[in-house]
Structures are given as structure tokens and as C-alpha cells.
Amino acid sequence: MDGNEGDAELLGRVAEGDREAFRELYDRHAPWLSLRLGRRCPDPGVVDEVVQDTFLAVWRGAARHRREGAVAAWIWGIGVRRLIDRLRRQPSRPRELSGAAGAGDVAPSAEEQVLLDVEHGDLGRALGRLSPELRAVVQACVLDGLTSREAGKLLALPTGTVKTRMLRARRRLREELA
Amino acid sequence: MTLWHIDPELLGRYARGDSGEAQAFSVEAHLQACARCRTALAPLADRERHELVWLEVVDALDAAQAGPFERWLARLGVPGHSARLLAATPSLRGSWLAAVAAALGFAVVAAQGSHAGLLVFLLLAPVLPVAGVAAAYGPGVDPTYEVGVAAPMTGWRLLLLRAVVVLAATTALAAGAAALLPGLGWEAIAWLLPSLGLTLATLALATVTSPLRAATLVALVWTGVAWAVWRLTHDGFALFGQVGQLASALLAVVAVVVLVARRDRFDQGEPL
């Protein structure tokens, strides 16, 4: 976590309106954000717009970010939600439109978060054995930190489907990692 | 937390989008927690796109931010472009409204002591919106005049829009001041009709000459009439009596007719 303290300090200066600090923060975080969003949206134009929106939100919201919590995770939270908003406004993926969306949101449970801390190699192997459909749902719900409803929007799936797939994936992973 | 780092070969494949789903998953989980690997990834991203997006971010930051007045108008449902044009009205700036408030304040203070002070207030209150309208639109006073001429909105609409808001703002200030007048008699509202008549007359005259000249003329005539009435009747307040109010209402009606008939004059560019 070597760079984390620097990030928090940078963000503090950004909150005071320091453009140079903002540029430094952008250089540190825009590249991975852009690549990571690019894996979830194939249109580079949309990705660039979302990165731009995200950093504008970072500039305006820097003062609201408390020092606890990693800056990278915070930026990702903003970025992925902007991407979902953007995709919702432009419904260019008409696949799997059938089925009503389930009601209610379920935030990723603490149990799901534990998956993130599983040692790298094991998790990779276990995930490798999941079907692509289940993996996409695990990625959205656990790695991206989205609610079932948000994940459904990102993947163009009904919320209920996201929930049942997540349930199945969790069971499968638990068996693999046991 | 971890001593493990992503090896450069995997990082390169991730950046190119060639890594498998599961590998990308663990790369991303690790990147979220590891500044060192994020730094290693940075040079692998598209440099040109990185700079272009930055320029867009800076552009957006430098773009004019909507002021509180503009945001308030937007909340009331005023469309964005109208709100921007209204917010740019010179006579709606804080300094202008402060000057109006100060003038009214002095008149109110003067009215506490004497009858003459009260008369000053009554003479002043109708002229203030006239001055506001004069400074609301036209070359020389309006920094957005050139923009306005080129805008897909008629000058007539813009002037009316601004005049209405200026009239409302100034009238509200005058009404507030009037409430502080001693005795609160009929004088407290006697200026309302003359105010409306004079403002509309200014707008009507603005179809012939520039708003600034129209306002100056109206203010001079108003002063002249007030002086004449005082000379004839030896009662300054006669101007605000029944005949005066009726004349004000008549003036307002005539001005509206002229204004509607000659509205095209606003869109013939340079006045006039």
C-alpha cells in the first residue's frame, strides 16, 4: 500500500483547488481506470467520456472523501457507476430483454468481499472453472462492488438473474476454495 | 498486505486486452490495492487518449460555472439558455441591485423626517426600474449584447424577458422599502402604477432609439412633469392623485400597444 498515503495527501490538495495535484492524481489513476472500464465497455469513446466525468466528479467531490478508505477504490466506485448511468442512457445492447427485473437491491455481503482477499492463485484457478456467465456476475458484484441491480444494468440482465447466478457462483467458489 | 506483484508480461497482456477473464479478474482485484502495480501499468495505457481526456477535463473545469442566480432560475424551470442570458443582465448584478437598495434606503431615511423626503421616495421609486431596463439590454451596457444579437432568440424576447425580471426585482426592493415608510398610508403603493407606466413607456421608446436614451428621456419627462405639477398645484403629491394614477395606467396601455406593433424593430441589429 505504498502509494496510498500519497494519494490521500494529493486528494487533500485537490480539495483545496490545486490543479497540479489534480494532474498528478489523474496521471496515477486515469490509466488503470480507462483500461478497467474498457474491459466492461467496448466503445473507447464512451470510456473516455466516463473517465472525464469521473475525474470531474473527483475534482468536485475531493473534499467529501474522508481519509479512511483507499482512493483507488473510491475512484473506481465513481467510475463504474458513471459507466452504468451512461449505458442506461444509451441502450445499445438489446440482448436478454425478457424477464422482469427483480425488486430490491442486495449490497455485496461481507462474505462476498472475503473472496477478494483470497490468495491470488487459488482465486484465479477457482474463477477459471466458473462458466463465463457466472464469472461476469461475480466480477460485477464482488470485484466491481456493484449492487445486484447495478450489475444487472451493466450486464443487461434482470436483477433476479444476477441474484441467482451470484448464489450459484458463490456456492461453486466455496466448494473450490474449501 | 501482499508481497506478490503482477509480472510485467501479464500486465502487458491485460493492457492489450489479451488476458483471460479469470486472470483479468485477479489483476483488477490486485490493482485496486497496489499502487506499485498501478504505476507499472500506467505507461502501457494509450498516451494520446490519456492527454486528450485530460484536455477535456480541464476544459470542463474552466467552463463558466453557473452562478447561484442562474441555478435558482434553473430550479424554477427556466430553460438553461434563458437562465444564462438573464443572469448576464447588467442591471441584475449584485452591485446594481445594491445601488438600487441604497438609493431607496436614503429616500426612506429622508421620509422619516419630512414630507419632502416622502415625495423624493415617491418620485424615485418609479424611475429605478426604468434605469434598470435601460441597463438591461443594448450595446455599450450589456457585455453579452453581441452574443444576444447572434442568438436564436429575438432581441424583443430577450429585452422583455430581462425587463420583466428587472421590474420584478426592483419592484420587490421598492415594496420592501415602502413598508418602512412612516405611517404606511396610500403613499406606500402610490408609486406602483407610475412605475409600470414609465417602464413600459421606456420599452416602447426603445423601439425608436436605444434603451439608454429612451430611459433618459422618460426620466427627464417624469421629472419635468413632477416639477410642473408642483408649480401648478403647490402640492407635490397631486402627481400621485387620481388623475395621476389614471394617466399612468393610460400610459401603460398605450406603451403596450406601441410595443407590440413595433416589436420587429428590436431585431434589426444595430439601433437605431
Image (tube, rainbow, N blue to C red):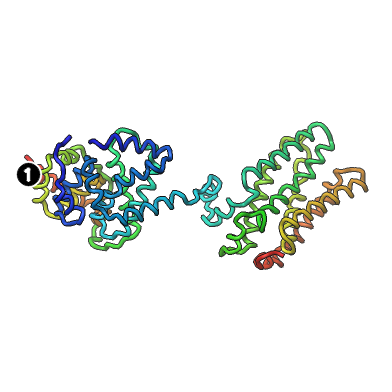
Give the structural element (helix, strand or loop) at label 1.
helix
> Which of B23 and A80 lies nearest the eye of the viewer?
B23
Residue A61 appears in which quarter of the rendering? top left
In the rendered image, the residue lying farthest to the top is: B113
* A86 relative position to B114: left or right: left
Q: Quadrant of the C terminus of chain B?
A: bottom right
* B117 relative position to B265: left or right: right
Residue A68 appears in which quarter of the rendering? top left
Residue pointed to by mark 1:
A176
Residue drawn at 32 percent across, 58 percent down: A46
Q: Is residue A166 visible?
A: no
Image location of residue B185, percent across then percent down: 78, 38
Image location of residue A5, percent across then percent down: 29, 34
Image location of residue A81, percent across then percent down: 31, 49
Chain to which the residue tagged by mark 1 belongs: A
Q: Is residue A41 visible?
A: yes
Q: Quadrant of the N terminus of chain B?
A: top left
Image location of residue B87, percent across then percent down: 58, 50
> Which of A7 and A119 lies nearest the eye of the viewer?
A7
Q: Name the amino acid, label 1.
A: Glu
